[in-house]
Amino acid sequence: MTGTIATITLILFGFTATGCDSDSADDSVGTVYDVAQENGFSTLVAAIDAAGLRGALEADGPFTVFAPTDAAFAALPAGTVESLLLPENQSTLSDILTYHVVSGRVTSSQVVTLTSATTLLGQTVSIEVVDGSVFINGAQVTTVDVQADNGVIHVIDAVLLPAS
């Protein structure tokens, strides 16, 4: 019996000691901007830079970003991305990108309980769960809960376009 108590105590101490490490600065994964960059969202990162939003997405947040893949951007009509990246379209691009961001850290377990969310643009996106898949304005969420120091990223398969 004493051996069992000692074993349980050691196991519990191990969990407690392990838990203490999780608060260290070494656990930093970077901002949502950094995480997007490190995970190969090259078109999204280029768009964030062109829109002048890098500083905002490196701020404390927290933010939830519905991040379109490079393939999602490529699926837009020919020339759309190139046009949006031009300096004269910075305002339009900023509107499109802020339509992909929600204030707060909204994890996948929270997203599935919602029917809509208000974006940083001030417009609402609809959220639907169909046969276990989550859709944001019809764009399917393909990867959930990519953690960043200042928020979370959910990957989507289409670019969301706000109302004009």
Image: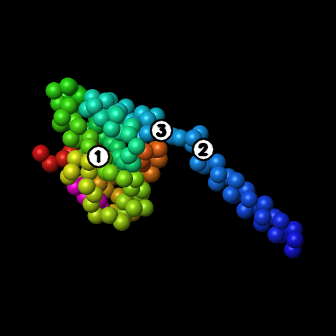
In the rendered view, tell whether residue 144 sits above or below residue 71. below
Helix, strand or loop for disc 2:
loop
Q: How many marks?
A: 3
Q: Position of residue 161 (x, y in %)?
A: 20, 45
Residue at screen point 18% across, 36% down: 92
Q: Which residue is mark 1?
A: 100
Give the amino acid type for the residue marked by disc 2 in the picture.
Answer: Ser
Q: Which residue is mark 3?
A: 30
Give the amino acid type for the residue marked by disc 1 in the picture.
Answer: His
Helix, strand or loop for disc 1:
loop
Queried whether the magenta region covers residue 126, the answer comes back as yes
Q: Position of residue 156 (x, y in %)?
A: 34, 47
Asked whether residue 36 appears in the rendered view, the answer is: no
- Quadrant where the N terminus is found in the figure: bottom right
Part of the protein shown in magenta: 124-128
Dividing the picture into quadrants, the one containing residue 52 is top left
In front of the other: 30 or 128: 30
Queried whether the magenta region covers residue 159, the answer comes back as no
The crowding category of the residue bearing disc 2, from other C-alpha atoms within 10 Å (few below 14, some 14 to 19, many at least 20), is: few
In the rendered view, tell whether residue 4 sits above or below residue 10. below
Q: Is the residue under label 2 in contact with that under label 3 (CB below 8 Å)?
A: no
Q: Position of residue 74 (x, y in %)?
A: 28, 35
